[in-house]
Amino acid sequence: MPFSLPPLASVSDSESALAAATAPLIHFDHVGLRYPGGAEVLRDLTFSVPAGSFVFVTGPSGAGKTSLIRLLYLGHRPSRGLIRLFGQDIATLPREDLPAIRRRIGVVFQDFQLLNHLSVVDNVALPLRLAGADFAEVDEPVRDLLRWVGLGERLDASPATLSGGEQQRVAIARAVINQPAILLADEPTGNVDDRIAARLMHLFGQLHKMGTTVIVATHNKALIEEAGHAVMTLKDGYLYPGLLEDELVP
Amino acid sequence: MSLPAGWESEPGSRLARRGQDIPLGRRGADRFLPYVLGAITFLGALMLVVAIVAVESLRVWDTGLTGTLTVQVPSLEDADGTAARVARAVRVLEQADGVAEVRALSPAESAALVEPWLGDAEILAELMLPVLIDVELAGDGAVDTIALAIALEEIDPGIQIDDHGEWVNRVLGLAQAIAGIAVVSVAIVALALIAAIVFATRSGIAAHRHTIAMLHLMGAPDGFVGRQFQRHMALLALRGLIMGVGLALLALAGIAWAAADVPALVVSIDPLAWTNVGAVLLIVPVGFAIALVAARLTVMRTLARMP
């Protein structure tokens, strides 16, 4: 059953620095998504996410979590409905304005989507370079972050030579390196051990405290319960508030 | 801070990078593009020279043969009789309105004209070649050829006046046709060059679709991606253009060498004339500009259809 999520200022961290922001950073109004030739995977989604929120999107496999993330990073246009990001209707945005919006969104893809012809350092530096950063600004933060996620010895390696967990850490480093306004993560802890998972969630928490709006798609119940942030559940293409207990991995 | 080895500064940009953001040229799909463009350029360069020679010949024949007449006085066994009739004919021609200059060709000059077709001087000496009189017309070349023919007929009914009209018209028609075909061929070659660039650019975008999509999602504008394709395609095209033009100049040099001992018949052709060489060399910058624009338009249009 479709619903309108209340402003997350009431359900997300009260300590969040930007939770009191007035206009929602993300607003979906009766959004639907249907891939060509397929059934509707997202149905009548209506919700708002204020700036500075930390939200988990959960649900069973195939519920539409990845599709929702895809809409949020402008990887796909909705079949119907209205999406507003940073207060702007993305349907009416001219194409030349999309890069600026996208540079404010960091994405951790479920399948990492690293560029294998670039080294680990170059993959992580890419968002900074696309944002026009000087080399001096790029090099040290990139190396520091990679050392922090435990990849200090693999800086010049090709992503293709890394394990799944290492690739995931590179993908996360790439997503957070330019401190995006919105961080989207699709199953970010799916391929890492508990120690690294805790470290990554700590990183997300730090970014959140610095004002980044974090949206994490996961079906990991323990992760959600431990973090204690707002939760939305997708099931059969519809969005519900809170946890639906029977749909989660314990 | 100094840049580590392998990094390079990008002029006009604050960005620094090592390697390519899009691994163009690594998948081999466009490896053959310079050779294809080289072959296209080679053919185009030769057709361009053909067009230039044809147009130049048109100009030479048009200005050289209009405004002149050739009068043929049949030779008799009596050389003095022939000379007397030639002298009378010259006088008639000189007195005619619209005639600027009259000159009777010597037997040696007449023999030289037909020698390429009929052979050496011994055979020509046995032939009764007519005496030729070159008549240059004044001003706009208007002359009453009928009145002239009647006046000359009184000297010898066998005297013929040739204003070259029929020959000029036929040769000009042929030359125009050759020039037209050559120009169309050059245009077709230019279109083939554009088509090759468009096809290679589209193939490159299709081959690197994933990388381009990722760059887009990280906030790369179309121009950032487009510049990399544009630069890559333009450099490939430049290699092909230089290759094709180099081969064409070699071919022209070969033709010039082969034609060095052939006497000029209808028109004197110098394949290595500066107009020909200059036009062929001009293909490189013009082709490069066409390739640049074709790649740019193709990549930007294709990218505009991507998310």
Image (spheres, rainbow, N blue to C red):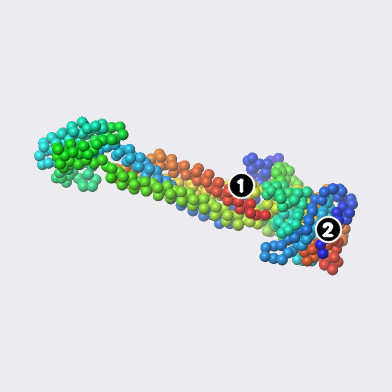
Residue B152's spot in the image, x, y percent?
A: 17, 37
Q: State the mark number for residue A4.
A: 2
Q: What residue type is labelled 2?
A: Ser
Are circles 2 and 1 on residues that touch, CB within 8 Å?
no
Q: State the mark number for residue B303.
A: none
Position of residue A205 relative to residue A190, above or below, is above
- Which residue corresponds to the image point at 66% horizontal and 46% vertical from the top-left? B17
- Which residue corresponds to the image point at 47% horizontal and 42% vertical from the top-left? B282
Position of residue A2 relative to residue B186, above or below, is below
Q: How far apart are marks 2 and 1 (CA)?
A: 44 Å
Element carrying mark 2: loop
Residue A249's spot in the image, x, y percent?
A: 82, 66
Q: Name the foreground residue: B134 vs B221.
A: B134
Letter of the chain that mark 1 sits on in the rendering? B
Q: How many labels does the image show?
A: 2
Q: State the mark number for residue B227.
A: 1
The image quarter containing residue A132 is top right
Q: Can the viewer see residue A13?
A: no
In the image, taking residue B203 as reference, residue A177 lies left or right, namely: right
The image quarter containing residue B305 is bottom right
- Which residue corresponds to the image point at 88% horizontal and 55% vertical from the top-left? A11
Q: Name the foreground residue: A207 vs B180.
A: B180
In the image, taking residue B287 as reference, residue A226 lies left or right, namely: right
